[in-house]
């Protein structure tokens, strides 16, 4: 599933209608499902905007994911307030998570159950609790910057996940979502530690869990494809899913060279997900540069400020079509062709399709210049998975859905297993 963000009050309605009916097939509310929007006063559930975004997805034949049921930011005015640790853990969080997940129903591929709970000053070897206390944010401490301890353990995370497990559909993955993750580094190690804690101490089975790698990166600061592949494989070995949840790639300037590097990095992140057995959601944060939270000048999205596709948008379409055609993952990456065998004999397999030019180089590699046509969602084997594409103009993948799902026509370009 290839997605982006949407809120009903977004500008550029005609662009959004077009891009979500032809290019993206997955939607997340940029703000509409957050605590400030969904529980304006304690115990009062207001899912109007969140449901409106879910309806927008459905009307465009797209699937929907939920972001988020707990975050220390964008809280309603009554939070954090003077709520005690025990009231928060035993009442406030369970009530909010139940209201939101139960209210949003079963058509949610995954929920960001907790968002951005791991600190940025962590170091290797920290325990899950140390990783979260390093955030130095509510609710492990009060929000008045007095460094006063509030919730002294990870019970707030356990409460969120155990409530989510109780009320979410059995097909919905429950994610811990965070930024600056995906490389082989201390924050990603902390994510794995917190995931293990959620499994062990909240009793959440790994086959219900996921890690959301937000991926707010730049052309000078990104995780290598090799690191992403290794982290996704580690999650797969546990039975957990990997999600790319908020990808944007800021540029120092929108030169053609920077945009081609951006395309190569986008291709690496997409390939790491496409060719992983446990990555089925690839979300881009804000669909075009003038709508980006980064600001227009960062040029961090797939479409420019006139709504025209950038090289990265073509690259994404090309990688999807390459995958759907059964081609192996490229060995060349944004870091060059060092991964490719320099002198592979003609016609031999190189564990990826090495570019015809053989010498390794540091030139970023992107593979496309064709405009995006329709989204192709990869399938697994002879049948298409739940939510996967199963038909549409130009579709060459499976047309039969894995039981009990059926192939339903969303539009001439896209049929999905629902
Ligand atoms: O809705 C109000 C509007 O009524 C008011 O007139 C206007 C001016 O104050 O503010 C509007 O709310 C804004 C909201 O976006 C909706 O547009 C908030 O001020 C603004 O802070 C909020 O920004 C969002 C930000 O999260 C908040 O932290 C961004 O759009 C959104 O892209 C961003 O997304 C986060 C993810 O949720 C988590 N990961 C990081 C990512 C980027 O920060």
Image: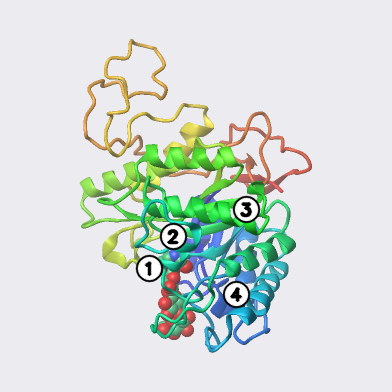
Residue at (41% x, 68% y) in the render: 135
Q: Label 3, label 4: how many angstroms apart (C-alpha)?
A: 32 Å
Badge 3 or badge 4: first in the primary sequence: 4
x, y percentage for residue 207? 65, 46
Q: Mark 3 or 1, which is nearer the eye? A: 3
Residue 355 shows in the view: yes
Against 397, is 81 above or below? below
Residue hosting label 2: 285
Number of residues whose C-alpha sits closer than 10 Å to that of mark 2, classed few (under 14), some (14–19) or many (20 or more): many
> Which element carries disc 2, helix, strand or loop?
loop
Number of residues whose C-alpha sits closer than 10 Å to that of mark 3, classed few (under 14), some (14–19) or many (20 or more): some
Residue hosting label 1: 293
Q: Is mark 3 within 8 Å of ligand 1?
A: no
Against 201, is 413 above or below? above
Out of 287 and 83, give the one closest to the viewer: 83
Residue hosting label 3: 199
Q: Label 1, label 4: how many angstroms apart (C-alpha)?
A: 19 Å
Give the image quadrant in which the ligand numbered 1 is located.
Answer: bottom left
Q: Which numbered dot is residue 49?
A: 4
Out of 13 and 220, give the one closest to the viewer: 220
Badge 3 or badge 1: first in the primary sequence: 3
x, y percentage for residue 15? 46, 62
């Amino acid at each position: 599933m290839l997605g982006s963000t949407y809120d009903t009050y977004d500008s550029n309605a005609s662009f959004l209608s077009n891009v979500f009916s032809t290019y993206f097939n997955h939607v997340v509310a940029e703000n509409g499902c957050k605590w400030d929007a969904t529980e304006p006063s304690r115990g009062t559930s207001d899912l109007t905007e969140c449901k409106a975004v879910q309806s927008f997805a459905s009307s465009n034949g797209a699937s929907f994911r939920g972001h988020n049921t707990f975050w220390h930011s964008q809280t309603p005015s009554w939070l954090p307030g003077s709520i005690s640790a025990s009231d928060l853990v035993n009442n406030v969080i369970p009530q909010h998570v139940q209201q939101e997940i139960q209210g949003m129903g079963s058509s949610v591929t995954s929920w960001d159950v907790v968002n951005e709970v791991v600190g940025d000053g962590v170091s290797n070897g920290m325990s899950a609790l140390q990783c979260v206390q390093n955030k130095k944010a509510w609710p492990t401490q009060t929000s008045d910057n007095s460094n006063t301890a509030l919730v002294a353990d990870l019970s707030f995370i356990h409460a969120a996940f155990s409530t989510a497990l109780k009320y979410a559909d059995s097909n919905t993955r429950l994610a811990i979502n965070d930024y600056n993750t995906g490389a082989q580094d201390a924050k990603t190690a902390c994510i794995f530690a917190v995931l293990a804690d959620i499994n062990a101490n909240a009793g959440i089975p790994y086959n219900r869990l996921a890690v959301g790698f937000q991926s707010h990166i730049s052309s000078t600061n990104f995780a290598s494809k090799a690191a992403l592949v290794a982290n996704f494989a580690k999650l797969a070995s546990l039975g957990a899913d990997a999600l790319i949840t908020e990808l944007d790639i800021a540029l120092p300037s929108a030169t053609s060279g920077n945009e081609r590097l951006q395309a190569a990095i986008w291709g690496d992140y997409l390939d790491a997900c496409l060719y992983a057995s446990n990555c089925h959601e690839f979300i881009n944060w804000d669909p075009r540069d003038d709508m980006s939270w980064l600001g227009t000048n960062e040029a961090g999205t797939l479409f420019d400020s006139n709504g025209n596709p950038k090289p990265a948008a073509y690259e994404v379409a090309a990688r999807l079509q390459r995958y759907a055609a059964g081609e192996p993952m490229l060995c060349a990456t944004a870091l060059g062709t060092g991964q490719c065998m320099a002198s592979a004999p003609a016609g031999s397999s190189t564990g990826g399709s090495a570019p015809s030019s053989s010498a390794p180089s540091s030139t970023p590699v992107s593979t496309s210049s064709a405009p995006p046509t329709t989204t192709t969602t990869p399938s697994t084997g002879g049948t298409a998975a739940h939510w996967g594409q199963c038909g549409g103009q130009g579709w060459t993948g499976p047309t039969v859905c894995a039981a009990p799902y059926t192939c339903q026509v969303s539009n001439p370009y896209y049929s999905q297993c629902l």
